[in-house]
Amino acid sequence: MAAALSRALKLPGKKSSELGEYDPLTQADSEDDSEEDDLVLNYPRNGLGRGSCLGPGATDPRGSRTRLGEEEELEEEEEEEERGGGRGMGTGLRQDGAGGGAGPGQVGDPEGNKARAQGAIRTAAFLLPLACATLTVLLCAFLVPCRQGALQHHPQWETQLGDVGGVTSPPLALWDVDGDGKEDLLIAVTKISNSSQPISSLGTSKEYSVVALHGVSGEMIWSRSVKEPVFSIQCGLQTAATEGFVAQRENPPPVCLLVTPSCLTAINASSGKKLWKVQAGEVESRAVAVPNLQGDVVPDLLIAALPADQNSDLSLVLHSGLDGSLIGQPVNFTLTAQGKLIGPLLHETAAGAYYILFGLGTVEAISLRDIYRKATGRIPLPPSLSLRDPLWEKQSKTNQSILHIYSGSEPAEYLLPLVAGVCNNHNNLDPQSNRNSSRSDWVLLNSNSRISIIRERDTHNAWTVNSSAIHSRPAVGHFNDDGVPDLLIQQSANGVRKVQIIDGARGVCVWEAEFVCPRLVLEGSSILTTGGLSVFLFWAGDPLPPSRNATKVSTSEPVLRRLFLLHPAYPTILQQLITTTDTALTATVSYQNVHKDASYVVVLSRPISGLGLGAQVVKSLSVRASLTSALTVRLGQDSKASGPLTPTAFQINKLFKQLSFRQ
């Protein structure tokens, strides 16, 4: 190799006919390695030798060298195209010479760069919305919480609890006892230990208990045995101190009050365990929650009882809401009239003074200040009783400080606040329920034949409507949009039930219909919709044609009893939700704010063949779910209701499909 290099430096080399340049290294290598080059380059191509018509033959060294240079340049161009990305890459030009240098390897292509930029923009425009959509789905799936119990919503359930004789209505109440945000049901249950004997001879063979049922599924949460029949269940009493709960650390448990003929018992609504129990004499009424009188931040209680002496007619008794202990002494009253016990009810006047409404066939009012002073004999009054109402005090008697609200010739049967959605079976002791029923006018029903509205501001009658045979409490709701609650009343005579809605502002009938009388003594219900109006529910038999003579209707008890729903938008249309042969005893409405729905809870008496008893059945149904399968009933065209008489099936389905409720 050294000899070859020395010769290449000393001897003149060959000039290439194509490049025209002198390359001593190439010349030296060609002389030493000529034989090896011939072996490599002189292979046949496609069956043709180098001397063919495609180019110089094997004996032409210049042709061989030229072909080799072209192949090397082609290989270099392919490698440069692969490194440069193919399109738009320049081809290097090799120049060998003494004064020559290597040129640029690549030449830029503006059209290729523009095309690549447009492709990048299109790719980004596609990927950016896709990424945003993916993030949105992930947020909805993982970050937004599902509504609690949304997948466990039961449109209807039914359970059997105990036995019932006759048409006795068991007490029930609604309250969230398990903390899931939905109202649960508490109901008194009676079981007959020996059903083979007549019910009149059972005596002590009855077992009493209180049961809590889950409001969504109807499953039993807990059951508690009691020694006496329970005639009132009320919830919402706050007694945090009884179990040592501190407001800053933990929420107090819900507390319910069980009222029996001789005792008051407070229980933990979550477990049914007893918190306290006191003897209360001969109790005659439900309890009323009054403002705190002892400074322990717990509302206190007031009940009506029979007095110990025989000279008085009624006693009002104060009990501590903290432990049930007696506050002072019972306050006795001698009332001239006799009749059904009215109240007691708590009323707060416009000036903030508290009065208790009560009576026996009459409606009287007495200041809570006077009751507390007579019970305790204390001159300093608690702060909750510091306010007075001069307008009410002027109307009171000077001797007993009693104000006569109603003392007419006909005894009073019912007195209830004129507040939409008020149900007799809520019976709650929480402040919200007290506020809802306070500072309102009152509905007064006299002798089942006359209904009146008493104004709160001056205790005078706003209007009076004469009727006949009203057999249950009116249901209060909004049939029109004047802001004044209206009344649904039910009358029964000669085998016919007439259902009417009375305008609460004017005292005129705005809707009525007649049905076969199902012989049920059960008040109607109203449910407030999100649109501001109410739907009304009531039990009746088959609708009667308007021209039918009521006196010719058979008085035999019908087999089927039907639950109807009336919406003010279509007064000639009823939705039939339930058809049953059972006897409805009592009912209430539970709101489900999460689903904007309401549940109608009814207690039924189901006959047991041959025993003279009935099984107590609790049935709950979602109103919205029931409307999807309800039977549409069209009433007669001469109804007193105003509005469209013949709505189409599409209009009816659209209205009830979009219906939602609120509390």
Image: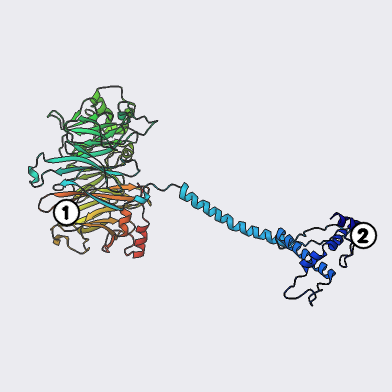
Q: Check the image and report above or below for 66 versus 389.
A: below
Instruction: Look at mark 1 in the image and give the residue it sits on.
Output: 519
Quadrant (top left, top right, bottom left, bottom right) of the N terminus:
bottom right
Query: Going 22% across and 45% down the picture, which residue do you hit?
Result: 445
Give the image location of residue 474, x and y in percent.
24, 48
Q: Nearer the viewer, residue 605 or 231?
A: 605
Left or right: where 543 falls relative to 1: left
Give the image location of residue 15, x and y in percent.
89, 64
- Choose the circle earlier in sequence order: 2 or 1: 2
Q: Nearer the viewer, residue 640 or 254?
A: 254
- Disc 2 residue type? Leu
- Judge the density around disc 2: few (<14), some (14-19), many (≥20) Cα neighbours within 10 Å: few
Q: Nearer the viewer, residue 360 or 12?
A: 12
Instruction: Look at mark 2 in the image and give the residue it sits on.
Output: 11
Q: Is residue 466 visible?
A: yes
> Circle 1 sits in a helix, a strand or a loop, which is it?
loop
Left or right: where 556 falls relative to 109: left
What is the CA distance from the residue labelled 2 to the residue labelled 1? 138 Å
